Amino acid sequence: MRRDDIDAIVVTTPHHLHVNEVLLALEAGKHVMVEKPMATTVADCDRMLAAAARRKLVIAVAYNLRFRDLPINARELIAANAIRTSGIVAAPAAPSEQTLVTR
């Protein structure tokens, strides 16, 4: 974090470690992208946001399904009345698999 040629870091560690690592990065003057969840408590999220604001740095939460086709496909199926909106989208242990459950 002391390197001047690095402007930002990505935090992908276990959730309970996010707050300390993000705060260290922000204090070092680095922008941060942190995998979701941002932290394990709302208070820790507030601390992280306040630290970023104090330093005028960006903190962003990465959404790992943002560029997947499944949410788009689900929206199309709902619009076509092929599935009901009372369904639940669940992610099994394997991140490459998605299951759509309807009631």
Image (tube, rainbow, N blue to C red):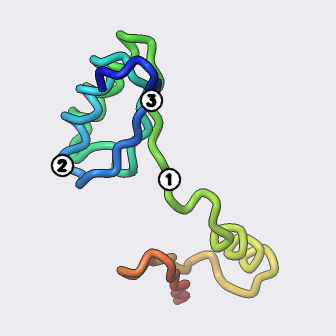
Q: Amino acid at mark 3?
A: Ala
Label ID, residue 63: 1
Q: Is residue 72 above or below residue 4?
A: below
* Earlier residue among tags 1 and 2: 2
SS class, disc 3: strand
Residue at 52% across, 87% down: 101
- Nearest the viewer among 55 and 50 is 55
Do callouts 2 and 3 mark residues in contact (Cβ within 8 Å)? no
The residue that mark 2 highlights is 16
* Earlier residue among tags 2 and 3: 3
Label ID, residue 8: 3
Q: CA distance from mark 2 to mark 3?
A: 20 Å
Do callouts 3 and 1 mark residues in contact (Cβ within 8 Å)? no
Q: CA distance from mark 1 to mark 2?
A: 18 Å
SS class, disc 1: loop
SS class, disc 2: helix
Residue 90, visible in the rendered structure: yes
* Earlier residue among tags 3 and 1: 3
Residue 80 horizontal/vertical position (percent): 81, 80
Residue 50, visible in the rendered structure: no
Q: Is residue 33 above or below residue 5?
A: below
Q: Amino acid at mark 1?
A: Tyr
Q: Nearer the viewer, mark 2 or mark 3?
A: 3
Residue at 78% across, 73% down: 79
